[in-house]
Image (spheres, helix red, strand yellow):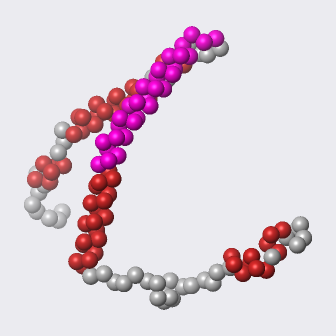
Amino acid sequence: MSYRWGRFNDPDRISRVRRTFQYPDDHDGNEPDNMDEQEQEALIKTLKQENDDQNELWIKYLPYLVGILSLLIGVNGMGWKDRIGVHDGFWILSWLPAVIFTMVIVARQVLVEVDPDELLNMQYDLKGA
């Protein structure tokens, strides 16, 4: 094995890495079976339920985690307040994540007042232009 080619000079390695190209319409027997409409609807319903469960979990815990981390950053910045060589406004800047988090929570509460289901009821019955 020469230094110039290194590990690619080994014929066994080349044969392991090399794969033949297959066109998309080649049939190799590993294709999924066609699903009828009921199976598709059941699969979509299952996937939607799993997605909703995951979203609910993150919606419950993520704001708490972000809030705690924002407070930790702010408290850590207070430790830099009287240090020599650190700009005077640095500790104020460290509270920026907490301020942004508070603004997002307030905006979220305001937006909750808009009910999408209520908007669907207000939708026009006429279709088209």
On screen, residue 51 above or below 8: above
Which corner quadrant of the image does residue 108 belong to? top left
In the image, 74: left or right of 83? left
Q: Quadrant of the N terminus?
A: bottom right
Please tell me in which quadrant of the rendered image residue 85 appears. Answer: top right
Please give the name of the residue rendered at 18% of the width and 49% of the height, measured from the top-left corner.
Answer: 116
- Compared with residue 87, is residue 1 higher up or lower down, i.e. above or below? below
Please tell me whether the stretch drawn in magenta is mainly helix, strand or loop: helix
Q: Position of residue 86 (x, y in %)?
A: 61, 16
Q: Is residue 43 left or right of residue 129?
A: right
Image position, residue 121 (x, y; %): 10, 53
Residue 93: in sight, yes or no?
Answer: no
**Residue drawn 18% across the image and 38% down it:** 113
Q: Residue at x 64, y 11 (%)?
A: 84
Q: Is residue 50 visible?
A: yes
Assign the C terminus to one quadrant of the image.
Answer: bottom left
Would residue 109 appear left or right of 89 to someone viewing this image? left
Q: Nearer the viewer, residue 27 or 93?
A: 27
Residue 81 magenta: yes
> Magenta span covers which residues?
56-84
Between 119 and 112, which is closer to the camera in this rendering?
A: 112
38 lies above or below 101: below
Residue 54 place in picture, x, y as percent: 33, 53
Q: Magenta stretch containing residue 107, yes or no?
A: no
Look at 63% across and 84% down and name the residue there. 20
Give the x, y percent position of residue 106.
Answer: 28, 31
Residue 6, image quadrant: bottom right
Residue 27 relative to residue 104: left or right: right
